[in-house]
Amino acid sequence: MPKPKLSWTEKLNDSKGLPKIEAISGNMSKKWGTGTVVIPAPQDVNALMRKVPKGKLTTINDVRAALARKYHATIACPITTGIFSWVAAHAAEEQRQKGVTDITPYWRTLKSGGLVNEKYPGGLLAQKRLLEDEGHVVVHKGKRVIVQDFENAHVTL
């Protein structure tokens, strides 16, 4: 019998033995050099995303920088941090569908430069609506969708 599929909330709460701090090695050292990398737990990423107040914005790189500081590492793993932000976003939407109102405001965590994350629940249109509901202006620049004047709403975690 196949194992039942985990809900997004179950995935968010499954730490998988994380966080871990390891030496930067292999292919990662080509881009990041030497030092240590923290592989965060999903709840680490979620907790930082929850800190972004209404009307303010941050980036996944800010989340990574805060994780590196918290764990005294050189960097936070860009891949797992990105995956866990995606898990946090989907878990928040799962909770919203159950009537929970105090959810992680994942739409406030953007890609670098204020770029809207199309991989969050509902895609670009849903993110645009959530951001505009909080007073942000979302514009198209070619194929990219960004928050106008992102720098003015940006907070460092």
Image (spheres, rainbow, N blue to C red):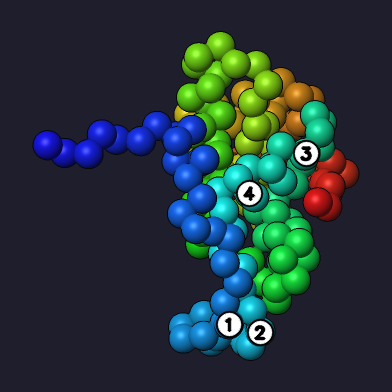
Q: Report crowding for label 2: few under 14, some 14 to 19, many 20 or more residues within 10 A (C-alpha).
A: few
Q: Most extreme residue toward the right, as rendered?
A: 152
Residue at x 58%, y 60% (from the top left corner): 19
CB-based contact (under 8 Å), mark 2 and mark 3 = no
The residues bearing labels 2 and 3 have C-alpha atoms spaced at a distance of 29 Å
* Residue 49 pos. (x, y %): 69, 42
Q: Earlier in the sequence, mark 2 or mark 4?
A: 2
Q: Is residue 105 above or below residue 157?
A: above
Q: Report crowding for label 1: few under 14, some 14 to 19, many 20 or more residues within 10 A (C-alpha).
A: some
Residue in the foreground of this view, choosing between 43 and 93:
43
* Residue 104 pos. (x, y %): 65, 32
One can see residue 152 in this view = yes
Q: Which amino acid, by three-letter code, is at mark 3? A: Val
Residue located beneath label 1 in the image: 23
Q: Earlier in the sequence, mark 2 or mark 1?
A: 1
- Which circle marks residue 45 in the picture? 4
For this view, does 35 lie left or right of residue 90? right
CB-based contact (under 8 Å), mark 3 and mark 1 = no
- Which circle marks residue 35 in the picture? 2
CB-based contact (under 8 Å), mark 3 and mark 4 = no
SS at mark 3 in the image: loop
Q: Which amino acid, by three-letter code, is at mark 2? A: Gly
CB-based contact (under 8 Å), mark 2 and mark 1 = yes
Rendering quarter of residue 46: top right
CB-based contact (under 8 Å), mark 1 and mark 4 = no
Residue located beneath label 3 in the image: 52
SS at mark 2 in the image: loop
Q: Report crowding for label 4: few under 14, some 14 to 19, many 20 or more residues within 10 A (C-alpha).
A: many
